[in-house]
Image (cartoon, rainbow, N blue to C red):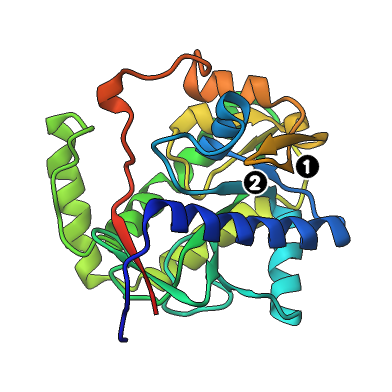
Amino acid sequence: MKMNKELNEQEIKSISRKILKEIDTICRANNIKYSLIAGTLLGAVRHKGFIPWDDDIDIAMTRKNYQMFVEYCTTHGTTFELKCLEMDRQYNYLFAKACNKDTVVVEKIGNRSQCSYGVFVDIFPMDYIGDTFEEAKKNVDIMKLNRSLIIAYNWKKFQRNQRNSIWKEPIRFAFYLITRAINIKNIEKKTEDFYINLSRSKTKYIADAVDNGYSYKAIFPSDLFEKYIEVEFEEDRYFAIQGYESWLKQTYGNYMELPPTEKQISHHSFEAFWK
């Protein structure tokens, strides 16, 4: 694919905002509930927009709403292209990306299968995970190996994770080697089906179980995802869980305090271009 000019940070932010606006319009018109999440929620609360050294947008939906959104995108025209397991065999993540069609993202580490997608908004399903915290932890752990294999499968090459303890690196390297010789689609389906089946019944705890970058810190009382309010993000209004303070405190601690200057950097590892 021929690529033209590389996008700068402001262009990436502008494109992402347009995608978010369209998602918001679709969700409002079809009674699909969503919330800004992760650094996007933190940015909305602390900065009224993007975290200054970040440029991505993340939202979350309960599994039922996530499936409604995917179904809408399969049956209606959108200006963005939705990438998810259900819609692209080359895609190998357990969450969706709503992608700009006129751009292309080149991952430095991930997307080993070379699935084509543009500047994106990440959409994470939240799954009901158990009626007690211990049950929720158990159901997160059941698929921990599968999630680790899916992550390792997507690495183009192995490289040291500077944020991990050194003793974890041999384990990560073993996962990397194993995933060069397995059928990842079977593991993806088994993992996704497990959490879809759990979410058929509403329980007292909910989690971003398929991505789960925060381990047990990603397990929350499910009533957090029952009521939504509007918050400001880059001069527009979007939805967030009403109890966002609890979510932010559990995830980030003192979330209103800025990190040290040396940590005010983006952790993304991709470049984006106009097609």
Kindly identify which residue carries mark 1: 202
Out of 228 and 87, give the one closest to the viewer. Answer: 228
Q: What's the mark number on residue 127? A: 2
- The answer to whether residue 39 is above or below residue 190 is above
Out of 47 and 203, give the one closest to the viewer. Answer: 47
- The answer to whether residue 271 is above or below residue 251 is below
Helix, strand or loop under label 1 = loop
Out of 119 and 131, give the one closest to the viewer. Answer: 119
- The answer to whether residue 218 is above or below residue 99 is above
Rendered location of residue 45, percent (x, y): 62, 27
Inspect the image, locate mark 1, and give the three-letter code of the amino acid beneath it.
Lys
Q: What's the mark number on residue 240? A: none
Dot 2 crowding, Cα within 10 Å, few <14, some 14–19, many 20+ = many
Q: Quadrant of residue 243?
A: top right
Inspect the image, locate mark 2, and give the three-letter code of the amino acid beneath it.
Asp
Name the N-terminal-most of marks 2 and 1.
2
Helix, strand or loop under label 2 = strand
